[in-house]
Image (cartoon, rainbow, N blue to C red):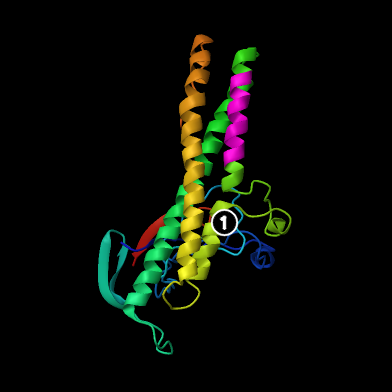
Amino acid sequence: MVRSFTGAAEKPKKEGEDAAAGDDSGPKPIPKPTIKPGLNRYTWDMHYPGFTEFKGMVLWAAENRGPRALPGQYQVRLTVDGQAQVVPAEVRLDPRVKGVSQADLQKQFDLASQIGAKVSQANDAVLLVRGLRAQIEATLKKTSDPAIRRSAEQLQQKLGAIEGRIYQTQLRSDEDPLNYPIMLNNKLAALASVVEDGEAAPTAQDYTVFGDLSQRLDRELAALDQTLSTDLPPLNTRLAAAHLPPIERKPELAVEQGTAAAASTAEGDDDE
């Protein structure tokens, strides 16, 4: 399976909705196939799914989409009311592109896939930190014990510092990176855009930058694991003694890619 899309019934537009649709700020929702009677048309952008996304994520010089599918033979499956139809399909290289081999495109696909997986690792860490910090904040509202508060606040600070090195937490809008530098997850996501800019094998610089950013992210992930291994058990011991629930390694829920659009009822599936 490369990609699947679930259809949704079209909702009647409200007054002023067309004007709002022209706003270019914020993430764009993934289009849903229409399911009206008769002929329907859907355009797949030939990309795999993107990386893990969290609420309020702002990216600079990058977008959340997976690597471009390689030229080759595929199948398209349409399922409606439990009935499936499958037809062959071919993804072709733009005939105007010269001097690029299938091996070059495979290298591009492989590196873009590795970068996307690394961005997901970074964003998963952000989700874990946010899930932990939300639990700690709830706990601090339930106790005035100085030992618990001191231990919880120290853990909060350490987690916040790690999150801030992975993602620029000051970002609230598309233009905020002009004032606040992007961090590791955004740098990796921007690198993916560079790697896929055109049909060509990655450059030596692409691999070098990816290696450097990956090592830096791995250090932050190791710091997160070390912090939770050393600071979380003592805090939970104090919480147990005070008959308070423990802080669990429970991440905040990820959001669906392109959730700027409201969820709709699913009725059919398109699979590429």
Q: In the rendering, at what x and y percent does residue 191 appear?
A: 52, 64
Most extreme residue toward the right, as rendered? Answer: 179
Question: Which residue is painted at 63% across and 32% down in the image?
Answer: 157
The answer to if 160 sits in the magenta stretch is yes
Q: Is any atom of residue 21 visible in this view? A: yes
Amino acid marked by disc 1: Asn
In this rendering, is residue 234 above or below 208?
above
Q: Is residue 157 left or right of residue 30?
A: right
Question: Which residue is painted at 57% across and 40% down in the image?
Answer: 162
In this rendering, is residue 4 above or below 146?
below
Question: Which residue is painted at 40% across and 75% down in the image?
Answer: 39
Q: How many marks?
A: 1
Magenta-colored span = 150-162
Pointer 1 local density, CA inside 10 Å: few below 14, some 14–19, many at least 20? many
Q: In the rendering, at what x and y percent does residue 197 appear?
A: 50, 74
Q: Is residue 179 left or right of residue 105?
A: right
Question: Which residue is painted at 56% across and 47% down in the image?
Answer: 166
Depth check, front residue: 61 or 54: 61
Q: In the rendering, at what x and y percent does residue 60 appear?
A: 62, 61
In this rendering, is residue 104 above or below 25?
below
Q: Which residue is mark 1?
A: 186
Depth check, front residue: 89 or 115: 115
* Quarter of the picture holding the C terminus: bottom left
Q: Is any atom of residue 248 visible in this view? A: no
The answer to if 124 sits in the magenta stretch is no
Depth check, front residue: 7 or 259: 259
Please name the predominant secondary structure of the magenta segment in the image: helix
Q: In the rendering, at what x and y percent does residue 145 appear?
A: 63, 12
Depth check, front residue: 103 or 135: 103
